[in-house]
Image (spheres, rainbow, N blue to C red):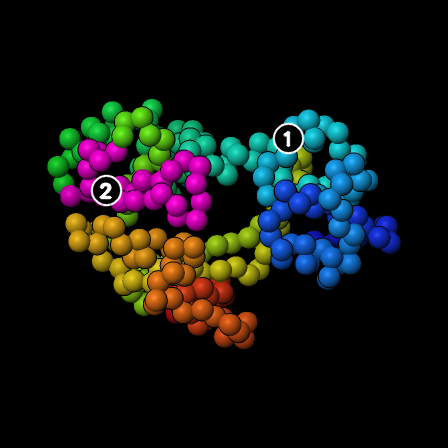
Amino acid sequence: MLQVIFWKTEIPLKFPSLECDYDLIKHVGKKLLHWKISNDLNDDWDVRWTDSNVPIDALAKMKPYQKVNHFPGMHFIARKNNLARNLMKMKKVFPESYKFFPKTYLLPNDYQEFKNSFLKNRKNQTYIIKPEAESQGKGIFLTKTWENINPQDHYVAQKYMPNPYLIDGLKFDLRIYVLVGGCDPLRIYLYKEGLGRFATEAYHTPNQDNLTNMCMHLTNYAINKENPNFIFNDSSHADSVGHKKSLKAVLQVINK
């Protein structure tokens, strides 16, 4: 269990107004932890929470007791293109340990190789195309051809897995939360609970009729919450209900 002890009686938790858009974070800091929230960059703050990367020069000026919620260089795994690039580098070195992700192309650099995969393989195949730096399912689409992709656009293209494991006929993903307490030495704390996010349309193998049905192929909450089928869960005591379930509830179904 990770235990954090603050030695000051009043902790100035720094929330510059342009850096944190989440009211929940401010509520936890101010109402639950009783920290002082400051918008002054010059305050002698202890904890800084920001929604974006912290500039290197700001990190260099930090005092030994100050903490931020981002490590330098996080974009090397937080952006889809950088994550894919690093996974493929690791796969070259450890092929058996890194075969858990599908065939991946980084466009536009790999555009010709991506195109050739269709020309060489005449079988029915589908790729999922993701903008390299977007989130919440924005800009994602499925394709069965290279011809509808601009050779200059920046995407991560991955071979779509046509036979996913389903629960109640729906695709889902598992969101597991970790806290990286430090890099040297590496300290990682795995939270015991998480989320299972479900699609809201019954899954069928991709074809020309359902290729654009993102509520079937994607599990993003930002997309599925707009579907009339979406069931919200309003009770923490019924964590197996709705299209957002607890990790524990999903694992119970998987382990039956």
Above or below, 125 against 226 in this view is above
Image coordinates for residue 143, horizontal then vertical, percent: 23, 42
Q: Residues within 10 Å of mark 2 (few under 14, many from 20)?
A: many
Tag 2 near tag 1, CB within 8 Å: no
Image coordinates for residue 211, horizontal then vertical, percent: 23, 50
Q: Residues within 10 Å of mark 1 (few under 14, many from 20)?
A: few
Q: Secondary structure at mark 2?
A: strand
Viewer can see residue 65 = no
Q: Which mark is residue 132?
A: none
Residue linked to disc 1: 55
Residue at image position (20%, 41%) is 144
Viewer can see residue 127 = yes
Q: Answer left or right for 33 relative to 231.
A: right
Q: Is residue 133 magenta?
A: yes
Q: Secondary structure at mark 1?
A: loop
Image coordinates for residue 146, horizontal then vertical, percent: 21, 34
Going from N to C along the chain, the mark reached first, 2 or 1, is 1
Residue linked to disc 2: 143
In this orientation, which residue lies closer to the viewer: 54 or 94?
A: 54
* Image quarter in which the C terminus is found: bottom left
Image coordinates for residue 88, horizontal then vertical, percent: 40, 32
Mark 2 → mark 1, Cα distance in angstroms:
37 Å
Residue span colored magenta? 124-149
Question: Which secondary structure dominates the residues rendered in magenta?
Answer: loop
Q: Is residue 110 magenta?
A: no
